[in-house]
Image (cartoon, rainbow, N blue to C red):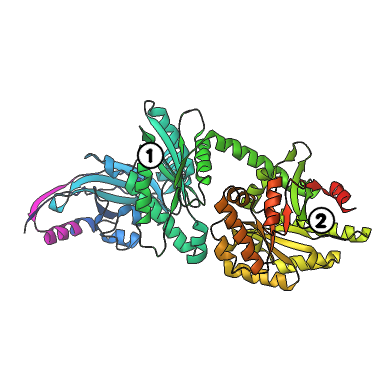
Amino acid sequence: MLYSINVKAYLIVLSENLRGQCMRFVDIKEELNKETGLRVIDSILNVGLLASIIIDKDTHQILYQNKKSVEYFGDIVGKLCYEVLCTRETPCANCVLPNMTGNVSIYDCYMERINKRVRWMFSDISWFDGKNAVFAKLVELGEEDITSNAKWKYLQDMDQERQETDGLTHIPNNKKFYKNVEDILKNATNEEYAVVLFDIDRFKSINDIYGMTKGDEVLVHIARVLKDSFGFEDNYARMHSDLFAYVVSYEKKGDIIKQIEKLRKKIARNDFDFSINTSFGIYLVDDRQVPVNLMCDRALMAVKTIKGDVLKFCAFFNEQYRADMLKANEIEKDMQNSLANGDFKMYLQPKFRLSDDKMVGAEVLCRWLHPKKGLIPPMDFIPLFEKNGFILKLDEYMWEEACKTLRYWIDKGVEPIPLSVNISRYHIKYNDLEAVFTRLINKYNISSSMLTLELTESLFLDNPEALNRVMSGLQRLGFKLEVDDFGAGFSSLNMIRNITVDTIKMDKDFLDNEIATEKGKIVVNHTIDMAKDLNLQVVAEGVETKEHVEFLKNSRCDVAQGYYFAKPMPLEEFDKLMQ
């Protein structure tokens, strides 16, 4: 079969002095088959000492190389030029191929692969089968052959490209994203835009369980999805770690959500042995004077509001998030110093036996008396400390305060009453509770029976087997265990027959909601009866009215705690009740 070949082969005649180089074009127009044509090309291009390659202009595939280029690069026919010459996964930002229009292009650069300064000379040619191709010859340059301006421009371009490209995924990084978004917002004044950030749910678990290499593959997969979705729009980036971003125009909020749903589906379609779920935060650009990095921060705030909520995958930024974040930052800034300075105070709320109204114990509660801000409510700092892990330090501080108080009463000759301290899920996971509490009772020379350890009901849903092991060990040491907030969850009746605790504390809301109706009263009565049959003590918290007290007495509840009897109080005030 015959093929038309117009190898405008551009034989390059070089003088001995490379500065005086010139170029002479020789057209070869012959009806040749491909095999014969390649022999002709070989005879032409292997005569000189310069490396030559021919590249498909549309696909970047290398169609031909002469022997000299094999010495430089190895066998690269059939491969993509940007992969084998520039070691990139995507076409170079300054690629000359798209701009070739029949003229000769010269490009001076430093090639890291061969560690040489070179000059590439490009020209358009027609290849077999009518393919549009580019003929490229490479000339090595000495230090004196490359102009200072060209050298510095290339090095600056390469350095800037490296600085603005993510090394793993080869998509823009946050620095490039900020610039691109600025340009987009500056040039498209009549469109509405949104900045969207998203990350991978439980990405740390993927790294921990499957290895960091697999985690990197996930990040590359997501980058590929963004490339496929947005092409060369330069509107997306990997910001850091597993955090990605993009900017998009919209008419309605629903347009943004639909696009997010499509992206999530594409990301979820993969060959991994595990699911990849993502959470998105959206900042609607209503003020273009706001720096892009702050827009991203606000989108990230929105992401954080839905973490841990399996029913939500995206959220729009609300100014209240920012206010909450600033408030949280202020709290986190002060927490370490306040702990060191003793600003966290132990308050005690008494527990009374309903049969004779005698005080039989107290719950240890934490109050933050800030030197400048005054009393900070627990709901303003406890949830935050549970998120950032500071609850571990704070709880251990309160446990020690409780043990110190028991020792104080004993030394004064006052008969101590048991104190209840709270244990969060974080202690079960990160602490050796047996060792911690053994150290405390030994340090203050007190009996373990003087401490009741309160665990919230939700703890039993996380890892009941591990929790039971910890609880059994603590009971063997003589500590009393109590389930707090009993009745707040959905598993109470099932849990009551499996747990190995000594006491259940009925949640205030459970008490309020149930005794409001006759059916509810029956539920509470039967719950107490079941606890009694299982030899569990029953404590009711949040007891605030005489009606509560009368009902609980009639229901055979053992102990009550709440404002009807006494509010939480500092130790100095509580001591008066002990006399």
Few, some or many C-alpha atoms within 10 Å of disc 2 (few <14, some 14-19, many ≥20)?
Answer: few
Query: What residue would you read off at disc 2?
Result: 358
Q: Which residues are magenta?
A: 25-42
Q: Nearer the viewer, residue 223 or 333?
A: 333
Mark 1 secondary-structure assignment: helix
Mark 2 secondary-structure assignment: strand
- Residue occupying image coordinates x 67% and y 40%: 330
Query: What residue would you read off at disc 1?
Result: 256
Report how far apart the C-alphas of labels 1 and 2 lie in the structure.
62 Å
Question: Which amino acid lies under the numbered mark 2 shown in the image of this protein?
Answer: Lys
Q: Where, by quadrant of the figure, is residue 186 drawn?
A: top left
Specify whether 101 is left or right of 347. Answer: left
Few, some or many C-alpha atoms within 10 Å of disc 1 (few <14, some 14-19, many ≥20)?
Answer: some
Question: Which amino acid lies under the numbered mark 1 shown in the image of this protein?
Answer: Ile
Residue furthest to the bottom: 476
Magenta-colored stretch includes residue 41: yes
- Percent position (x, y) of residue 141? 39, 49
